[in-house]
Image (tube, grey):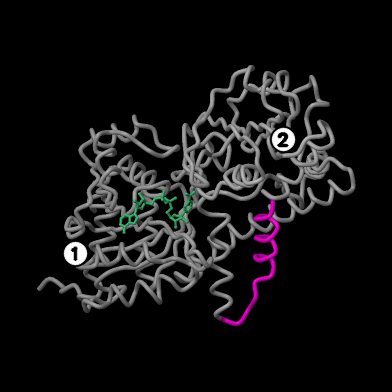
């Protein structure tokens, strides 16, 4: 008599086999900066991938072979579609055909800076009616420790399925760094933590098919905390170096020179650089998920709050320095001055403007009465402060015409010698002009 597989092991063994043989159907929910690169990697590894998104425009765009995010080209999306193994859809009934579901929806902050997990809950409500037995569900969205176990698990168990036996649930934080050419979804190691050891093993096996290296931790809570440590580490170090920039200003020292010299130490120091503030969907937001959670445990996360305070005031500091520069060099006020700001994306060589400090700087300058022009080769227009802003062409005539050029994003394609040559004065918040030798007297660094 063949040995009967116990129900508790049945789906586990089946899933491991299907995943290893790349026969499992992968669903990715949310096709943005995180979900689209993941989908492309899964297709490249040979999986059938269905991308689910509530944005019909995005679904149409992807199915027509076009990408709307920086790190994925149209060619890559077109190729994925042509393999016949990738399609985008807003029809969540197709979840019933999926063996794995990766949830990659936004996790912003509410107006009161509390975690907004409504996107996760909406995604769950859309997929829940269609999840079949044996499915692996992985949350990739950054969130506070406890979300997967306390919020997601009870919802998925409502239809009577047992975790670790009938379905598998894990958290694996995406670590993508938009615009980073060296480290991508594929070659950045993955941290994985499941609700049960079986969940961890199924999720780990899933990621091992596409990603260079995986690192299992003891629980979903631990995996959630890992991501928050990584992003808090960045926020706190950027906060520290921004404060060092404020100190250097008072000490009449060049902060960039100090950092470069400190970075010559081959151990025990890692350079971070100051700037006009934090941007993107991660560093300005994620640490607040952690401090919010800790408040509920009666603990005040001091480093996080202090770094957040320093970083969020950097746009005001930039505007103060602009004000002094105009006053000291030209006996002018910001009011009625013409200012050309370069870059609105939150960092170099991408078009992502989410939480970009450049937007705050532009608003503050406009509120003080400046005529602000902007140029960004990656962002042709945007709406902010109630008005539509359009990128102006970066001509020598415009640069000559304005009272001041303010560099807010250090895009590599800018012709910095030409900008310095033609400008009356420059406030450079990124040290983007560091290799320009001529007319250094026109440049003031953050
Ligand atoms: N952008 C980054 O650099 C980065 C890096 C690591 C982790 N993360 C985290 O990953 C998560 C996703 O971030 P992102 O940058 O990819 O966001 P994004 O805004 O680029 O993409 C999210 C996508 O989800 C879709 N969506 C929203 N609600 C949905 C729903 N109910 N069902 C299906 N689709 C839905 C949106 O239409 C959008 O296409 C966030 O938690 C973020 O913190 C982001």
The C terminus - image quarter: top right
Q: Where is residue 47 in the image (x, y as percent from the top left)?
A: 27, 46
Q: Position of residue 13 (x, y in %)?
A: 26, 65
182 over 1 or under it: above or below: above
Q: Residue 205, which numbered label?
A: none
Asked whether disc 1 touches disc 2, contact meaning CB atoms under 8 Å apart, the reply is no
Along the line of sight, the residue nearer the viewer: 55 or 184: 55
Along the line of sight, the residue nearer the viewer: 359 or 418: 359
- Give the residue furthest to the right: 251
Q: Position of residue 406 (x, y in %)?
A: 68, 34
**Looking at the rendering, which quadrant does residue 205 occupy?**
bottom left
Res 243 seen here? yes
Main structural element of the magenta stretch: helix, strand or loop?
Answer: helix
Q: How crowded is mark 2: few (under 14 residues within 10 Å), some or many (20 or more)?
A: many
**Location of mark 1 (residue):** 130
Span of residues in magenta: 297-314
167 over 315 or under it: above or below: below
- Give the residue furthest to the bottom: 298
Residue 371 falls inside the magenta stretch: no
The N terminus - image quarter: bottom left
Left or right: 57 as drawn, with respect to 370: left
Gap in Å between the C-alphas at discs 1 and 2? 53 Å
**Location of mark 2 (residue):** 428
Q: How crowded is mark 1: few (under 14 residues within 10 Å), some or many (20 or more)?
A: some
């Amino acid at each position: 008599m063949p040995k009967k597989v116990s129900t508790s092991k049945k789906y586990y063994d089946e899933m491991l086999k299907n995943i290893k043989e790349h026969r499992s159907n992968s669903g990715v929910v949310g096709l943005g900066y995180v979900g689209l690169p993941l989908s492309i990697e899964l297709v490249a590894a040979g999986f059938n991938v269905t991308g689910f998104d509530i944005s019909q425009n995005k679904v149409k765009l992807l199915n027509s072979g076009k990408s709307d995010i920086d790190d994925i080209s149209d060619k890559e999306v077109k190729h994925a579609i042509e393999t016949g193994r990738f399609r985008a859809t807003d029809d969540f009934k197709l979840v019933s055909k999926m063996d794995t579901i990766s949830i990659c929806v936004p996790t912003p902050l509410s107006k009161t800076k509390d975690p907004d997990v409504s996107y996760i809950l909406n995604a769950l409500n859309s997929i829940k009616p269609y999840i079949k037995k044996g499915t692996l569900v992985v949350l990739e969205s950054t969130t506070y420790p406890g979300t997967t176990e306390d919020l997601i698990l009870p919802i998925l168990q409502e239809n009577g399925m047992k975790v670790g036996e009938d379905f598998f649930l894990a958290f694996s934080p995406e670590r993508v760094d938009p615009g980073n050419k060296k480290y991508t979804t594929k070659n950045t190691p993955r941290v994985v933590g499941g609700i049960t050891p079986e969940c961890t093993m199924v999720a780990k096996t899933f990621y091992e098919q596409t990603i260079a290296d995986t690192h299992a931790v003891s629980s979903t809570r631990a995996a959630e905390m890992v991501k928050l440590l990584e992003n808090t580490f960045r926020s706190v170090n950027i906060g520290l170096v921004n404060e060092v920039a404020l100190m250097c200003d008072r000490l009449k020292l060049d902060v960039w020179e100090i950092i470069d010299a400190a970075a010559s130490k081959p151990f025990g120091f890692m350079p971070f650089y100051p700037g006009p503030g934090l941007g993107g969907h991660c560093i300005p937001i994620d640490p607040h998920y952690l401090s919010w959670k800790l408040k509920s445990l009666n603990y005040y996360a001091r480093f996080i709050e202090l770094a957040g305070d320093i970083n969020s005031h950097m746009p005001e500091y930039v505007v103060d320095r602009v004000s002094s520069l105009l006053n000291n060099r030209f006996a002018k006020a910001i009011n009625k001055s013409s200012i050309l700001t370069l870059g609105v994306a939150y960092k170099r060589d991408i078009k992502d403007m989410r939480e970009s400090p450049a937007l705050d700087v532009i608003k503050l300058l406009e509120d003080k009465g400046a005529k602000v022009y902007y140029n960004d080769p990656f962002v042709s227009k945007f709406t902010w402060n109630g008005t539509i802003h359009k990128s102006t062409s970066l001509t020598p005539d415009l640069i000559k015409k304005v009272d001041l050029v303010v560099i807010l994003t250090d895009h590599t394609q800018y012709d910095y010698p030409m900008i310095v040559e033609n400008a009356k004065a420059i406030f450079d918040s990124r040290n983007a002009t560091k290799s320009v030798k001529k007319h250094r007297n026109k440049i003031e660094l953050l």
